[in-house]
Amino acid sequence: MFGRIAGNIGQRIHGKVQQVSLALLALVSEGHLLLEDVPGVGKTSLARAISESISGSWSRLQFTPDLLPSDVTGISIWNQGSQQFEFHPGPVFSNLVIGDEINRASPKTQSALLEVMEERQVTVDGTARMVPRPFVVVATQNPIEMDGTYNLPEAQLDRFLLKMSIGYPDAVAEARIVLARHGGAPGPLEPVVSLEQVSRMIQISSSIRLDRQIVEYVVNLVHATRRTADIRLGSSPRGTIGLLRAAQSLAAAEGRSFVIADDVKRLAIPVLAHRMLVAPDAQLRGITAIQVVTDLLNGARVPGGVG
């Protein structure tokens, strides 16, 4: 089923097999995905292709400075006929929510997503309402254009399981994109899996075996992010949980019933780097969170005989 979804998305997103697979790991883990890249490389197209490939409900939010929290979560409106308030659900009441240019919304509106991204519920007028499951947020942002944008708070960044970029296509893939667009934009993709099948994929991946040595390997790696002098703020325990959960999904997607150290190595940067803050003096030396995670991986003791 994982390969079926990836192949379907590949009809729309050309030459980005690894990026598509990484994005799907968020879906299989029921975790949230942040796509950060320059304009025009297919961030929103990838998010839409994922939503169109499954038969569940999806919605799209274009984040703007004037967007209100109630535009995201929903609002209670007085019904004159029934003489009581009726709740009108917002776009977050979908299985997959696409948040386009999330950093253009005000901090108050961004915070409207904090509860639902972590607890899968929305509290309006003192009443908690559960969103449909599975529930995944796929958000995009442009790291270059800073005018009229608001940086995502660390608490919200920490709620994204994965952060990734797509990158420019190579010449062959770009030619395929141009030819596919010749004569007009392509129509929507046909769903290839049902919502029940996606739920089953989430259930299967969550049951993948985690050896104690793998757990200790990840815990030690995350603890090391908090001890290095180049990092002002290391990864949270949510990062530890997220890295292990994503590794389970990667193992399941590759047909294994257990997690290996290579799974952790492949996912450490997209899971951990965005949760870390580089110290100011390290920034002046050109050090990045990605570089720190890479160095920690190279220096960590890899568990042997796991699996």
Image (cartoon, grey):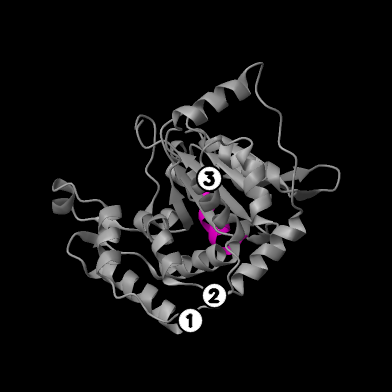
The quarter holding residue 52 reads top right
The region drawn magenta spans: 112-120
| Nearer the camera: disc 3 or disc 1 | 3
Q: Which residue is mark 3?
A: 17
Q: Nearer the viewer, residue 298 or 160?
A: 298
Which of the two labelled residues, at mark 2 and mark 1, occupies the earlier sequence position?
1
- The percent coordinates of residue 205 (x first, y second) are 61, 68
Q: Position of residue 54 (x, y in %)?
A: 71, 48
Does 36 appear in magenta? no
Does any portion of residue 191 appear in the rendered image? yes
**In the image, is residue 244 above or below residue 47?**
below
Front in this rendered view, residue 128 or 205: 205
On residue 258, which mark appears?
Answer: 2
Residue type, numbered disc 2:
Phe
Local packing at callout 1 (Cα closer than 10 Å; few below 14, some 14-19, many 20+) is some
Helix, strand or loop at label 1? It is: loop
**Prevailing secondary structure class for the magenta stretch in the rendered image:** helix
Where disc 3 sits, the SS reads helix
Instruction: State if disc 1 and disc 2 touch (CB < 8 Å).
Output: yes
Image location (x, y in percent) of residue 67: 54, 36
Residue 48, image quadrant:
top right
Q: Is residue 95 visible?
A: no
Q: Given the image, on which type of amino acid does mark 3 rest?
A: Val
Q: Name the residue furthest right.
A: 81
Q: Is residue 1 left or right of residue 38?
A: right
